[in-house]
Image (cartoon, rainbow, N blue to C red):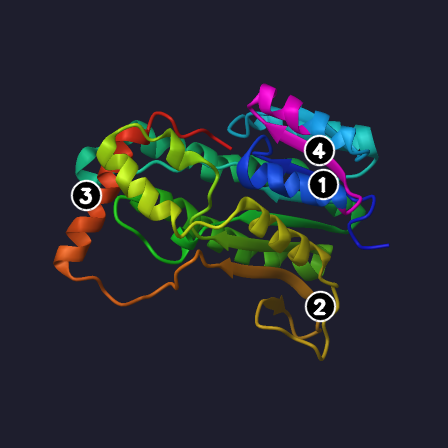
Amino acid sequence: MNYLDNKTVIVTGASSGIGAATAKALAAQGANVVAASRDKEGLVVLISDLQGCGHKAVSCVTDVTRAEETQAMAKFASDTYGSVDILVNNAGLMLFSSWVDLAIRDWHAMVDVNIKGYLNSIAAVLPFMIEQKSGQILNMDSVAGHQVGPAAGVYSATKFFVQAMTESMRKELGVQHGIRASTISPGVINTGWADKVTNPEGRKAAKALNEIAIAPEDISRAVIYALNQPASQRNRQRPDHLANPSGLVTGQAILIIHKTRVTHQAASPHEQEHQSRSHQRLHRSYRDRQPVR
């Protein structure tokens, strides 16, 4: 029997992409999956698939930007399965824009989902985990939380926030309350988004990014790995383990690169201009089509 067997796991943004792949991977491990998303239709398809395979899974239509809905989500998980053991904070929104665009509505939307949404979900599950004296919170981050790309300033800022927030959680919740906090930082993921770009120039830029994309299932395998790591790692520390001097692992920090290596070499002015134009083409053709996971 593995660690995840019969654990109650809430996955936000579960209706598609990384969230759906993660929900399926967790269910295959024997977890009790609570799939949360604003997309009711997407959840119906997911749960039908999981239950059809004999897995334990239920859905909870949830807007993570609304604290009362995340509170209801956590209570629903506890009432249904008797505990709240793991939160996979995955709901996210990415919109491209340059600062000169003054895309204030987009900025606020990303802050609402990527920051407030994460905080709302954490606040909802923490009381259950503190009472249990155990739990895991896995915050889906991004390579954008490590390196800022063109036209992605606000999105990157929200992901840098996730890094800082999770580090603080490890320090405050790990040893005292037995709650582990982890991050996974994916690169470009192939979730079918490139096919939705209609502008010819934007489609070309999207195709270039899609060529280095990896599958959502690659990320779901990393989620399973992180959650399955034993809490005690004395004398067998790994670079992706974050432990205190007692040897208790308080979380994982995993960076997953897409199909090309990450480089910190500064781009030439010409390259920077070309990258910015590519992102702007994507922004103009796709900004109103990007779903919230």
Compare marks 1 and 2 and give the one earlier in the sequence.
Answer: 1
Which secondary structure, mark 3? helix
Span highlighted in magenta in the image: 29-46
Which of the numbered marks, if any, corresponds to residue 277?
3
| Residue at 43% over, 57% down | 259
- Which residue has dot 4 on it? 34
| Residue at 83% over, 43% down | 6
Asked whether the beta carbons under mark 2 and mark 3 sit within 8 Å of each other, the answer is no
Measured along the vertical axis of the image, is residue 220 above or below residue 112? Answer: below
Horizontal side of 60 relative to 219 (left or right) equals: right
Is residue 113 in view? yes
Compare marks 2 and 3 and give the one earlier in the sequence.
Answer: 2
- Which residue has dot 1 on it? 9
- Which residue has dot 2 on it? 248
- Per the model, the C-alpha gap separating discs 4 and 3 is 40 Å
- Per the model, the C-alpha gap separating discs 1 and 2 is 22 Å
